[in-house]
Amino acid sequence: MSNSANLPFTEETTERLLQFIYTGRRDVIKTESVPELFHAASFLQLSTLSVECEDFLSRGISPEISLEIWQMAKLFEKHQIAEAAKSIVIQNFGMFITTDAIGQVAFELLKDLLGEVFLNCSGTVKCTAGWVWFIAHDEPSEQDARSLISVLLKAQNVENKDILHATLRFDGDSALGNVNSDIVKERKIMWDEACEFYFFKESQPTIITGQMGETGRVSELCEWLVVVGGANHEKASLTVLNYKKQNWYSVDNAPPTALGYKYAICAVGSLLFLSGGTQKPKQFLFF
């Protein structure tokens, strides 16, 4: 009706498409042009050009275009190309931590990458990638923030401090591009609230202890303990918080004196366990 169509690729790519259709010239397929040509050919179901792009990519995918090719191959279910591109992305993950690169990745694909067992990079790099994506995304929700941090908590090599410090690493850095400072502040609040949702903050857990009982009935006194914070999410082993020393210890490696059995609370993963109470007449905490 309007004699026009909106296509999800550039005018330059459209010109290359027409050149290939009318002349069959393969030289339109180059490293810098193949990502969009591959997308356009798959989108328009131009099987001949699609096969030519796949053949070009099968001879070698350069790291610079691997992230883009992986996403497109996943989108159009080109599984062999997708696996090849993903392996290159995994090997060169650090180069994509910019709003123009990682920021354009679909959320589910980002989580797939961060949870990839073969993504052999530091927790700092993984968490920075998550934060840069969060900054670049148009309208992330509170649930997106929680979901992203949940993936990071489960990822290999990631520690709580990596997640907490991710928002501080790239302030004013070129990786954030031209992102408005107000947006950065707004997203940082969402990130910090998502961290708190999983019960971990920058500071050590806060422990408050005391005694309570009915007036005049000292024998009824009992101790109470409140813990604000959480355990070491990245560890599956049993850990103990000595709340006098304000430190977590692994039960397997720490001496009994460090564990402080009379003044401790134990944890497995993100779960805290407290049992018992006072043992009359000594009135000390035990578990």
Image: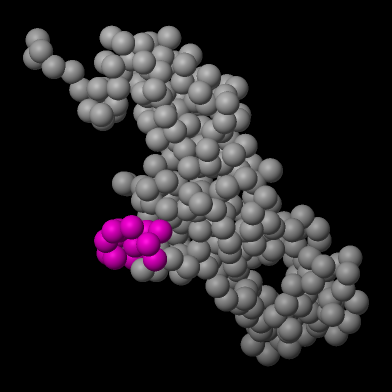
Q: Which residues are magenta?
A: 173-185
Is residue 221 visible to us here? no
- Dominant secondary-structure state across the stretch colored magenta: helix
Residue 28 magenta-drawn?
A: no
Residue 188, compared with residue 87, is above or below; it is below
Question: As drawn, is 108 to the left or to the right of 250?
Answer: left
Q: Which quadrant, please, contains the N terminus? A: top left
Q: Residue furthest left?
A: 2
The image position of residue 52, as x and y in percent, is: 47, 16
Tell me where residue 154 appears, x and y as whole percent: 65, 50
Specify whether residue 37 is in view: yes
Give the residue displayed 32% in from the left and 46% down from the top.
139
Which is more toward the observer, 160 or 54?
Answer: 54
Residue shown at 42%/53% (left/top)?
98
- Give percent across and percent down for residue 146: 49, 51
Of residues 87 and 207, the one drawn nearer to the viewer in this rendering: 87
Q: 255 or 111: which is nearer to us?
A: 111
Residue 284 rendering spot, x and y as whole percentages: 81, 81
